[in-house]
Amino acid sequence: LLDRSFGERWRDAPLTRVHGTTNLVLKLKLGRERFALRIPQLSDASFHVDRVSECAVVHAVHAAGLAPEVVACDAQTGILVTRWIQTPPWSPAQTASPSRIRAIAAVVRKVHELAPPRQVRTLDLAGNLRSYCSTLTVQSPKLARDFASLNDRSNALLQHRTVTAPVLCHNDLNCRNIIGGGEVRLLDWEYSGLGEALFDLASYSQNHDLDKEARQLLLEAYGAAPAAMQRFEVECQLFDWACVLWMALAGSATNAAERPRFERLVSRLRHAWG
């Protein structure tokens, strides 16, 4: 793929690993130019990643000025090459500031207003959660039993969940995937697709543990009606549950570095769901 993109000149160029990401991400230096090379490390099937959809989305959002330039996107392997943007990603400490909340609300609104590309998938949250739970039952039966009450509560919420017309969503608004100040761009569109706008906003809220006041500001800056707050809280809880299951399947539950966050999410859900 790199041969096709750059010719053989890349073979003598330095490749540096970028840490702090689930995927293998390498920074490629070619003269004065810099590129990011993303190689998936988890099973697409197990984590419901659609590479055809992702490739369609990354081209569309770059054309809209919301993501880096795409050099190559290979749907068969999941390898993605983009132009490197030198601006550093947001830090966790920045994410709750009013200015950053307003900035992310504005860029998410732009994403949601985009005409979706033809090959984009439609997300099935309920189906994905059922699949995660089924896989967890096989992979870690004890953990699945411990989570039985949380799964029951999730199913009850999904049964009565109110959703709006689907829009193009990012669905993983973690600060590591957000760069820029005045001109914000989003990275890592693996979990993108047509889905519920409030769930997309919930991914920002819950990834950064926003308090109620900050969540309210996020909705107001986005332009949501005040009555949406109750539905938003449900989406936040469902996003937490999706994260718990994803982390359990990805091995974060036993990873020393990730374990505290995993336990914090489980505790937050048990408190919210009794």
Image: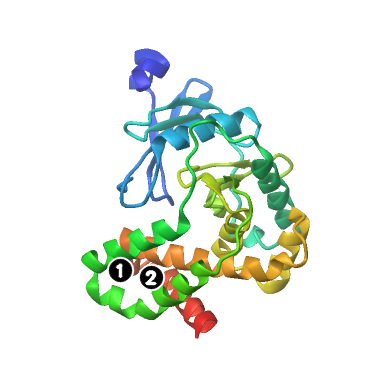
In the rendered structure, the answer to whether residue 104 lies left or right of residue 149 reads right
Q: Residue at x 75, y 58 (%)?
A: 224
Residue 214 in picture, x, y percent from top left: 71, 67
In the rendered structure, the answer to whether residue 39 lies left or right of residue 111 reads left
Decide if residue 179 is in sight here: yes
The one of 172 and 114 positioned closer to us in this rendering: 114
Task: Please tell me the numbered disc located at residue 254.
Answer: 1
Residue 217 in picture, x, y percent from top left: 75, 63
For label 2, the SS is helix
Q: Residue at x 52, y 35 (%)?
A: 57
Instruction: Note whether 130 is above or below 149 in the view shown.
Output: above
Q: Are marks 2 and 1 in contact (CB under 8 Å)?
A: yes
Q: Quadrant of residue 41?
A: top left
Q: Amino acid at mark 2?
A: Arg
Residue 3 in picture, x, y percent from top left: 34, 17
Q: Residue at x 63, y 36 (%)?
A: 66
